[in-house]
Every structure is written in C-alpha cells, then in structure tokens.
Image (tube, rainbow, N blue to C red):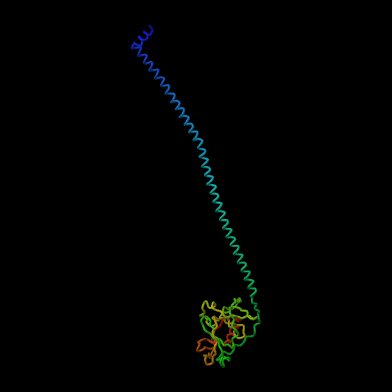
Amino acid sequence: MEKQHQKTAYADPTSALTHYLDELLHSATTQSVDTVVPEEAASDSAERVDVGDIADSAEAKPVVDEGLRADRVLAEQQRVALLQAEQQRRREESLAVERAARRERARQAAAAIKARREAEKQRVVVAEKPQPAPVAMPETQGRPEWAENAFECLIFRVAGLQLAVPLVLLGAIHPMEAELHEIPGRPRWFMGMMPFGGRNLRVVDTAEWVMAGRVPDDARDGYRFVIRLDDSDWGLACDNVAQSFRLHPDDVKWRSERSRRPWLAGTVIDQMCALLDVRAMSHLLSRAETEHQLDLS
C-alpha cells in the first residue's frame, strides 16, 4: 500500500518536477563548495609564494649590497696599492739620482785634488832675479859676425812658414811633451815656462813674432818642439824641425838696414826662408818681457 502510494506520488508530475529541482540544487551547491575550496587553497598558496618571494628578495638585497661594497673596497685597495707603488718608484728614482750626483761630486773632488797634487809636483818655482842693467842692442846692420864664413843652418816650420836658424847659435831642441807652466801677467806671446836640466826655459809663441797680424787661430795647436836660442833661457815653439844644410854667405840675401824687424838677418835664396839673428831676437825678447809689450817695429 505504501509502495503504491510512493509510486503514485512520484507519478504526480508536479511532485516529480519539484523533487528533480531539489536534487539539482543540492548537486549544484555541493560542486560549488568543492570548487571554492581549491580556489581558496590556491589563493593561500599564491599568497604564500608571494610572501616567500618577497622574503627571498629581502634576503637577497643585503647580499647584493655586500657584494658591491666588497668590490668598492677591493678597487680602493688596488688604487692605494698602485699609488704606493708609484710613490716608492719615484722615491727610488730620486735616491738613484741623488746617489749619482754624490758620486759625480766625489769624483770631481778627487780629480781636483789629484790635479792639485800633480800641479804641486810639477810646479816650477820661478825665482825672481834682479833685473840686470839694460843691455845695449847688438849690432844688427849688415852681415852678422857668425856669417863671415860658411855656416850650418837648421830649417824649422811655424804655422806653415819656413824659417832657418844658424846651428852655431842653436842651444838645443826640446820636445814639447808636458804642459807649460803659465805665469800670470806675462805678454800674450809668452806661452809659459818649460823645465829642463834644472833650468826654466821661457817658451815663445813664434808665430806672434814673425807673423804679426796674420797669426792663424790654431797656430799653437801645431807646436811640437822648442828650439832654445844659444845659451839663453829663451825658446821658440815650432811645428817641426827639418834638415840642416850648409850655407855660404853669398847664399843669403842679407839685410843692410834692420831698423824694422831686427831679428830678421836675411833671406836664404834657394830655400826662400827667413834667416833669424838669434842674438838680436834674444835681446828683443828680454826687453819685451821687461816692458810687457811686443814691439816688432
């Protein structure tokens, strides 16, 4: 009876439709709840991921800052190291230059001391002799007494000029090996003193005497020998010494009047060279030294 009533109830269209709608509503409500729950879970998960990313980012930022700070510190340390290295290099260069300068000053000082000692060893002590009474100029007119007969002559050269001197009045020939000892206050033609055999030879710039006004600038550079005049303390500087030869008085063109250049006795005809009057030249040199002048007239 009850089954028949239920079947009858379901058979009612209105009841059946109402029951069907209730079922659909129940089913839809259940699915909606199931769907919302995962979305909320996903939302929670998303929120957790975002919070985690933010946390990770917050933790990573100090790490990045620390890395930049370390790079800056390293760069500053490298800059300071380079600056210190450059300063050290400059100090070493300055010290090297200073040491070199000290060594050079010490070398110069030692050289000066050595030169001073050498000068002391080679110093020529020139004793001041009392001035003798003026000596009269020897006779210079015509032929000298040593040319009355045949005589020997020696040719020497001075700055390209060829000169001759009689051997009878030639004291000696000395090589000019050492530097001459200069004496302040002497005339320009006075080159200096040359010691020999316990004596001091006064050396003359011969070109200044025989080539007045036409002396080459480098005349003194060619001097290699000194010819001593007779037994005097005077010597003529010359470039070189040539051969000696014998002359007859007629081989010379003698000067009859020697008011000018009294040291020139004449001219050797064949050799075309000037023949010196040794004694007249010695006298002129002594007078010129005393009077501090050079008078070739």
Give me the residue at 52% from left, 84% from top.
162
Can residue 261 be seen? no
Which quadrant is the C terminus positioned in? bottom right
Give me the residue at 38% from left, 16% from top.
23
Q: Quadrant of residue 13?
A: top left
Nearer to me, 151 or 244: 244
Residue found at the far top of this picture:
1
Can residue 52 be seen? yes
- Above or below, 134 relative to 102: below
In the displayed structure, does residue 33 sit left or right of residue 107? left
Q: What x and y, as percent, mark residue 281?
A: 58, 85
Q: Quadrant of residue 122?
A: bottom right
Which quadrant is the N terminus positioned in? top left
In the displayed structure, does residue 2 sit left or right of residue 138? left
Nearer to me, 133 or 98: 98
Residue found at the far left of this picture:
13
Give me the residue at 45% from left, 26% from top.
41
Q: What x and y, as percent, mark residue 186?
A: 60, 78
